[in-house]
Image (cartoon, grey):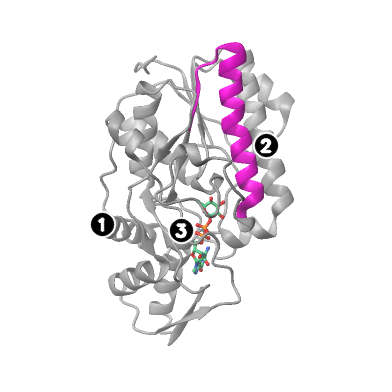
């Protein structure tokens, strides 16, 4: 099953960082029949609204990139919202994709679905082999339910629903709100504002020793289209770069690139979260996809985008 240039392709969550990267990539590849709807006009947590949307639009392919997402503070603060919103969104989209005969659906999860103490790098088969990281357990449980729901709809109804588990993401259209953002976006904004406000010090969270793998959303979008065209298996598949850095290393790289000369205060009252979550990406690499955007280039590119679109 492959996308054709005329296929009716619904990108759920098209305004978010991941959804907008998928739309950009599909447009650049000449796919003309994209279906999108704002969350103002279509609340995917609402079953009736979601059903009438599918009944009307009848998409053939679905990228399920709509979700309630956030960094370590948001996830540990709004636990009920993270599990409820994500379960509702994904259940409504998956159920209606089946009911209205969607040819193929790709569900997006996250690397936080794996146990906190997984051996590194993390293989897909480590899923459910241990306790989850507490700071993002609600989100992780919702995403595990989503990938399992795709597997069970395939098993019971023969649906061609696949799921992909990306690592930590960054890039254009990220969320730069310091309370709800992920670390990459938070550091871009903190260093930028500190530089232009001539601050002598900025505060970062935790010890800086956890390690994270960072994948640019344009690489992810290319991987997801690759999987939509080449992957039809029932088990989930990791998407990442295969390399990680400590938060401290990331901060030092960004501080140099952005040109902030002040000090960094590491507030250890804030949680570190999972010590490490480097993905084993040999499965997708063996299929024929590898990430291309190096982290240093990615930081430069994202900071340029930030200063042009937000930080001016
Ligand atoms: O990206 P982040 O918020 O989430 O935090 P996770 C990564 C690391 O960066 C943590 C540290 O150790 C944070 O303490 N950090 C340092 C900061 N300074 C900051 C800051 O100013 N802001 C933020 N946000 N972090 C997320 C999950 O976990 O990973 C999500 O909560 C999702 O559900 C995502 O799975 C991929 O990487 O720890």
In the rendered structure, find residue 297 and report the number of the disc placed on it.
1
Q: Which residues are magenta?
A: 136-163
10 Å crowding of disc 3: few (<14), some (14-19), many (20+): many
In front here: 181 or 153? Answer: 153
Q: Position of residue 169 (x, y in %)?
A: 43, 50
Q: What element does badge 1 sit on?
A: helix
Q: Is residue 186 left or right of residue 45?
A: left
Q: Earlier in the sequence, mark 2 or mark 1?
A: 2
In front here: 100 or 238? Answer: 238
In front here: 79 or 178? Answer: 79
Q: Nearer the viewer, mark 3 or mark 1?
A: 3
Quarter of the figure that contains the N terminus: top left
Q: Residue under label 3, please give it.
A: 276
Residue appearing at x 46%, y 58% in the figure: 276
Q: Residue under label 2, please give it.
A: 87
Tell me if residue 307 comes above or below residue 153 in the rendering.
below
Ligand 1 within 8 angstroms of badge 2 C-beta = no
């Amino acid at each position: 099953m492959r996308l054709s240039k005329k296929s009716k392709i619904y990108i759920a969550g098209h305004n978010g960082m991941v959804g907008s990267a998928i739309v950009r990539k599909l447009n650049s590849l000449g796919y003309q029949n994209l279906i999108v709807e704002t969350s103002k006009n279509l609340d995917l947590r609402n079953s009736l609204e979601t059903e009438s949307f599918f009944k009307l639009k009848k998409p053939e392919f679905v990228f399920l990139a709509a979700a309630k997402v956030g960094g370590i503070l948001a996830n540990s603060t709004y636990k009920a919202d993270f599990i409820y919103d994500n379960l509702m969104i994904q259940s409504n989209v998956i159920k209606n994709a089946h009911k209205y005969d969607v040819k193929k659906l790709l569900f997006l999860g996250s690397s936080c679905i794996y146990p906190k103490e997984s051996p590194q790098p993390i293989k897909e088969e480590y899923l459910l082999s241990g306790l989850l990281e507490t700071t993002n357990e609600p989100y992780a449980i919702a995403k595990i339910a989503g990938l399992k729901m795709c597997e069970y709809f395939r098993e019971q109804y023969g649906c061609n629903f696949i799921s992909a588990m990306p690592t930590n993401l960054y890039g254009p259209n990220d969320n730069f709100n310091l309370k709800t953002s992920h670390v990459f976006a938070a550091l871009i904004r903190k260093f930028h504002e500190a530089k232009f406000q001539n601050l002598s010090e900025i505060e970062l969270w935790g010890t800086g020793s956890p390690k994270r793998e960072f994948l640019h959303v344009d690489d992810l979008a290319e991987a997801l289209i690759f999987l939509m065209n080449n992957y039809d298996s029932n088990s989930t598949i990791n998407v990442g770069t295969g390399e990680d850095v400590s938060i401290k290393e990331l901060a030092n790289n960004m501080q140099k690139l952005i040109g902030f000369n002040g000090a960094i205060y590491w507030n250890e009252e804030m949680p570190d979260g999972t010590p490490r979550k480097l993905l084993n990406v040999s499965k997708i690499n063996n299929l024929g996809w590898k990430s291309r955007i190096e982290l240093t280039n990615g930081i430069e590119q994202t900071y340029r985008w930030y200063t042009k679109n937000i930080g001016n």
